[in-house]
């Protein structure tokens, strides 16, 4: 059944929300199901910086409810511009990042849909610079918080730079860019206390989310294992928004872009993630650096979802709504090329820090959609770079400069590096015989007819805030559902205000009643809070296995790491056998010993260590081997780092292979037996178990919601 995308203004409706001391009063429901909090009591009117009172702080000004955002929207521009300039010089969001050079190579031409040469010239290698980042934390924060990862790719094409700026999650928190400053202010450190850093587990974030029902789908994603990646080489990337491809006839087709990692998806366990942050704050950056240095270049497939306006009209959601995705079962992915990252930057600051991505950077044959979040980003990113890099000439910094010729009449400005010649700095002119001019082959926007009344109103087709959130939850495996419930219990347990916790559990009831009960029980609630009334009826959508993480993990050791714990007297023959088996399966193997100088083996030889036990815990590996003599096991049985090494490996559901001495250490650590704990004589069984996690073990080692 198709969603009605007509825009009919509806009277605001009072919202059924749990009562609280102050925050939930005066709430009304907007045309698209968004919440408006109206002035009352001691609350003053919200105004611009010029004192102009605002009638709507939830919607930007559009040509029509589903139309493009208008440049005349001074309220949006003031709010976004002020937000863009709140930090100098560090990025406000996406400050913590890893950047790598590489190339994109097209395998299948999209010439029927676009004139963009990067999407039509098969076999050509186009240089790229890819930057993968956390969102909430500062540049000095850890690599492994529960957080969205930015996934931005700059293509240096023959027709100019194309920036595909997305995330590792295909949807976002908000539908309209005018709410982005509020979202980030809510998730960032609370302004009166300066903490927490790089975390959502605090009152201001969940207070905002509880009043933003459009965020519920994204909440499901961020509480899932997707925000705990094992490696940046093992995440997906998404362009999030619908874009348009435009062909030679001027016909346009909608497109969504997807990056799929060759190594497959993989995430960590929450307890493991917390301990990784303590063991190695640079875990993801180091992992990428070591892979590039070793020649194990990470690779992603670029896939597209192509659909027409007629197709979109039949969807049970609005594809212009950035809080919605198009299930692969509805519009299958078409793989068209690959990206390989193969060169680490020569200088981190010059490239990874100074690279400037802007969604407005397109090439001929690609165009924007009317997605109101995208429309705001077209202004915001460029405006941010002007402040952060200090000049409108930031495009001249080598990492930002096109690799094709570029020329125009823009002049001067701070940090101008070009030296234009001649007396002409304008166009058209007759005084120069070699100045740049327009070309028929240049960028042309898609010819789209827009009708309707302009206004600050959200399309009614944006009003369904729960159906895809429910679809996502029901599509997960039972293990993943338990992780999501436990994550919400952890996060909401950090929230000081009971009414915020109650409001969130109320929203969960609209997603799945059992899910809400599990979270409520974990929070110690005596009764379930009232569920807010949905703006539109909640739909029962088909589950989508493609939305899983565990269900999409590859059984492989390629790109993974195995740690072998040894001590004086360890059997070198067994160590060599386990190392060879793991290496042959594609893993990197590191030797861990009580001392960084290594250990003296049973045959009298010395084996160098890659890491000292106290500084190289098992959280840094995907599977572990414990090869010890009887004396070595006895010595390590009183060493807390050794006990933690094996206990954490078991608790984090990893495969463990041990010889007789190793088993003595396992016994001392109260590590039990299961199919994932393997005898050193059976290296094949160990490799099989090491290619995945032992999910059935989890219920034995921790309580989940």
Image (cartoon, rainbow, N blue to C red):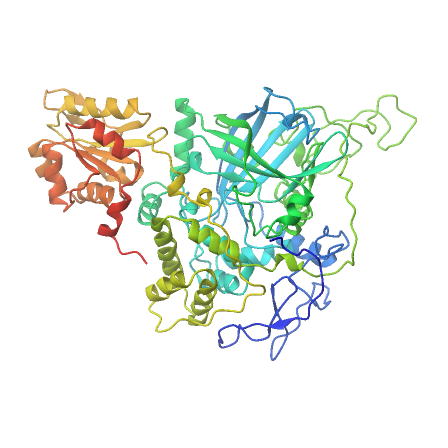
Residue 347's place in the image compared with 40, above or below, is above
- Relative to the observer, which residue lies in front, 359 or 352? 359
* Residue located 68% across and 38% down the image: 253
Left or right, 443 with reference to 213 = right
Residue 34's place in the image compared with 244, above or below, is below
- Relative to the observer, which residue lies in front, 265 or 250? 250
Left or right, 565 with reference to 629 = right
Left or right, 445 with reference to 595 = right
- Rendering coords of residue 227 (x, y %): 43, 47
* Residue located 70% across and 68% down the image: 55
Residue 446, image quadrant: top right
- Relative to the observer, which residue lies in front, 203 or 387? 203
**The residue positioned farthest toward the right in the image shown:** 430
* Residue located 17% across and 45% down the image: 640
- Relative to the observer, which residue lies in front, 610 or 687? 687
- Rendering coords of residue 256 (x, y %): 60, 40
Quadrant holding the C terminus: bottom left
């Amino acid at each position: 059944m198709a969603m009605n995308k007509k825009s009919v203004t509806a009277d605001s409706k009072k919202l059924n929300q749990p009562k609280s001391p102050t925050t939930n009063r005066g709430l009304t429901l907007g045309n698209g199901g968004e919440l408006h909090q109206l002035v009352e009591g001691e609350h003053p009117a919200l105004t611009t910086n010029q004192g102009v009172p605002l009638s709507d702080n939830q919607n930007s000004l559009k040509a029509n409810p589903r139309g493009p955002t208008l440049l005349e929207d001074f309220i949006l521009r003031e709010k976004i511009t002020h937000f863009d300039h709140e930090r100098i010089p560090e990025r406000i969001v996406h400050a913590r990042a890893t950047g790598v050079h590489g190339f994109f190579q097209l395998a299948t031409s999209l010439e029927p849909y676009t004139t963009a040469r990067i999407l039509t010239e098969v076999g050509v290698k186009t240089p790229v610079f890819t930057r993968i980042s956390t969102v909430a934390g500062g540049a000095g924060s850890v690599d492994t918080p529960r957080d969205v990862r930015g996934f931005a790719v700059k293509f240096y094409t023959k027709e100019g730079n194309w920036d595909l700026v997305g995330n590792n999650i295909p949807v976002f928190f908000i539908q309209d860019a005018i709410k982005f400053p509020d979202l980030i202010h809510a998730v960032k450190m609370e302004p009166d206390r300066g903490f927490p850093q790089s975390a959502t587990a605090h009152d201001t974030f969940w207070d905002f989310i509880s009043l933003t029902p459009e965020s519920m789908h994204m909440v499901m994603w961020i509480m899932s294992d997707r925000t705990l990646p094992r490696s940046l080489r093992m995440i997906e990337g998404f362009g999030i928004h619908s874009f348009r491809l435009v062909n030679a006839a001027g016909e346009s087709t909608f497109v969504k872009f997807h990056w799929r990692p060759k190594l497959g998806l993989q995430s960590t366990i929450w307890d493991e993630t917390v301990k990784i942050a303590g063991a190695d704050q640079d875990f993801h950056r180091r992992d990428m650096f070591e892979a590039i240095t070793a020649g194990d270049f990470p690779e992603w497939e670029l896939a597209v979802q192509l659909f027409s306006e007629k197709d979109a009209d039949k969807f049970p959601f609005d594809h212009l709504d950035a809080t919605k995705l198009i299930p692969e079962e509805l519009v299958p992915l078409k793989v068209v090329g690959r990206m390989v990252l193969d060169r680490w930057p020569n200088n981190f600051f010059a490239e990874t820090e100074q690279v400037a991505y802007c969604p407005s950077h397109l090439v001929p044959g690609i165009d924007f959609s009317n997605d109101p979040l995208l429309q705001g980003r077209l202004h915001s990113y460029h405006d941010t770079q002007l402040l952060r890099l200090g000049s409108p000439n930031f495009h001249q910094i080598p990492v930002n400069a096109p690799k094709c010729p570029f020329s125009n009449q823009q002049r001067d400005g701070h940090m101008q590096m070009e030296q234009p010649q001649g007396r002409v700095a304008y166009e058209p002119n007759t005084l120069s015989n070699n100045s740049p001019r327009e070309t028929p082959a240049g960028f042309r926007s898609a010819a789209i007819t827009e009708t309707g009344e302009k206004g600050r109103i959200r399309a009614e087709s944006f009003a369904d805030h729960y159906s895809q959130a429910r679809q996502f939850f029901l599509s997960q495996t039972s293990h993943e559902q338990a992780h999501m419930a436990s994550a919400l219990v952890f996060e909401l347990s950090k929230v000081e205000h009971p009414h915020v916790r109650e409001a969130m559990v109320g929203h969960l009831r609209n997603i799945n009643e059992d899910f809400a009960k599990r979270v409520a029980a974990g929070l110690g609630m005596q009764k379930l809070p009232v569920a807010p009334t949905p703006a539109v009826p909640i739909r029962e959508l088909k589950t989508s296995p493609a939305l899983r993480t565990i269900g999409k993990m590859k059984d492989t050791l390629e790109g993974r790491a195995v740690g072998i714990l040894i001590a004086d007297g360890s059997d070198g023959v067994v160590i060599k056998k386990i190392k060879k088996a793991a290496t042959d399966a594609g893993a990197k193997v590191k030797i861990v010993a009580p001392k960084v100088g290594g250990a003296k083996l049973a045959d009298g030889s010395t084996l160098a260590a890659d890491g000292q036990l106290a500084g190289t815990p098992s959280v840094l590996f995907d599977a572990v081997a414990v090869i010890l003599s009887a004396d070595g096991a006895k010595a390590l049985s009183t060493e807390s780092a050794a006990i933690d090494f094996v206990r954490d490996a078991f608790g984090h559901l990893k495969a463990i292979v041990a010889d007789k001495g190793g088993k003595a250490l396992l016994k001392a650590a109260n590590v039990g037996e299961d199919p994932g704990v393997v005898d050193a004589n059976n290296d094949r069984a160990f490799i099989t178990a090491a290619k995945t996690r032992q999910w059935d073990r989890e219920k034995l080692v921790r309580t989940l919601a």
